[in-house]
Image: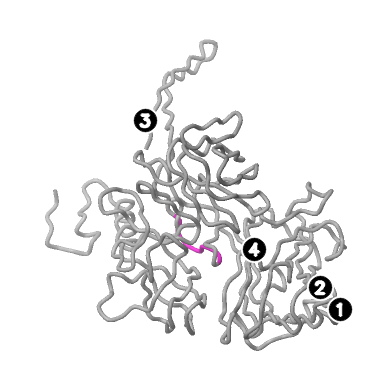
Amino acid sequence: MGKPSLKTTNFKQHPVYIQKALHVDNPFYGLKPQYQRAEIIPGGDCNTVADFTAPSAAFTVAASGDARVGTNSILLTQVDASTTASVYLLLSGPIDLGWAKFVGMWLKGGANKTYDPADIYLYIFTKAGNYLYANRARSIDFFPAQYLPGATPRWIYKEFDLEDFAIATGYEGDKLNEVWGIGWYSATGDNTNTLNIDQIEFYTHGTTKGPARGLIMSAPLYDDIHAERGYGLAWNEFSGRVDHSATDDYAFAGICVGNPSRTRLSQDVTGGTDTTLHVIDASLFRPGKATINDDSVAMESVTITAVNTITKTLTLSTAITGSFTVANNAYACMEGNEEGTTRVDFVVNGVVNLQAAQAVLQGYGCTCAAAGNAPLTVNQAAAGEQGQIIGKAVMAASGTGEYFPVNLTTDAYATGHEIAELLCKFEVGQNVADLLGKTNVNHP
């Protein structure tokens, strides 16, 4: 917690005198109740093919019994790669999705197919009567990088940040408080490509693999630690801060859902020459280590020497190596520092989607597969790994690379949660042993 500042105010013409007010400069780190929401849009369960419309035979829609959730998924097929075509899910009336930050869905590609950037676009219609070819819509490349599902495709989860969607030219004022449907637009691609789509939902907190359903905490990062959505975090042994999780992790804390210092770049960066970053919100930064990244260039660590909140620029100690562009959603975020003021939010319990590093059976425990300085992947727990289990598989994962839901139930969380409940229940003079269910402890 930061140093408190004391302010004194007098209202001499008023019968009430406010002499001293305490202002806390930095937020409290700990349990962080937040408004979390994840909702499936009407028809988004993908159980009924009649909810979807395919105006052209070049891009068809059908029901598939191969479902991730429920009885069916929706099977999209590119019949003619040379013809632009669309499939869309229209709503009977508008719904307000202004609260949402992400849209996601389960996905399975066709065996041995190739999916290139610009093959498919995902659209959100923000005005009535505007379909895929009309103006008032938001769009995003469904495959920003080449996707190769291999000979044995497995279910994955596609998560899109709603801030990354391009808004139709001339309609920048259109917001998500009036959404009439979503759709897929086939521009180019390979003939006979197929996609299974299931469980389309909008939500407020994401892990890169789907919604974060559970309790969220906030804690400062350990020195020089960079964390993004989906990273595994663990309590540092020597401080009340969080570090990257380890393979054999007895101090697993949770999965990162956000680094509050993250902000977008407002100008492109030229590698080898630029020593300044222009950002949307410079107030989130301070001198120290930061990370810069985008959708196409490898992550790079930089050192900030000065912050100008007026010009919204960050001065760096040396020139940046890579070239980062606004078009590729370039962003920067702080790493940890010795003051412990750079924090992250992370989900500590509840059901979240994770990526399997091997086949995992339903109901079996899961452990971290690697260090957590990348989106977390998990193994099936072996005998004797009870202390390293971070949760249990809600659904089986058939093999490496498949995403599946895991119920995070760490011992560390359970213990801390029980203590918090006891502190809330404790009253002066009450025997703590009674609360713990023990009888061999005397009253103080």
- Spatial distance from mark 2 to mark 1, Cα to Cα? 7 Å
- Spatial distance from mark 3 to mark 4, Cα to Cα? 39 Å
Which residue is labeled 2 in the image? 86
Is tag 3's residue or tag 4's residue first in the polypeptide sequence?
A: 3
Residue range corresponding to the magenta coloring? 210-216
Is tag 4's residue or tag 2's residue first in the polypeptide sequence?
A: 2
Q: Give the mark toward the camera: 2 or 3.
A: 2
The chief SS type of the magenta part is: loop
The disc label shown at residue 389, or none: none
Q: Nearer the viewer, residue 206 or 439?
A: 206
- Spatial distance from mark 1 to mark 4, Cα to Cα? 25 Å
Which residue is labeled 1 in the image? 56
Which residue is labeled 4 in the image? 103
Residue positioned most to the bottom = 65
How many residues crowd around disc 4 within 10 Å: few (fewer than 14), some, or many (20 or more)?
Answer: many
Quadrant in the picture for residue 90: bottom right
Which residue is labeled 3 in the image? 3
Q: Is residue 154 above or below residue 163?
A: below
Secondary structure of the residue carrying numbered label 3: loop
Residue at point 33% right, 68% down?
Answer: 247
- Which of the image's four quarters has the N terminus? top left
Q: Is residue 417 left or right of residue 136?
A: left
Secondary structure of the residue carrying numbered label 4: strand
Three-letter residue code for mark 3: Lys
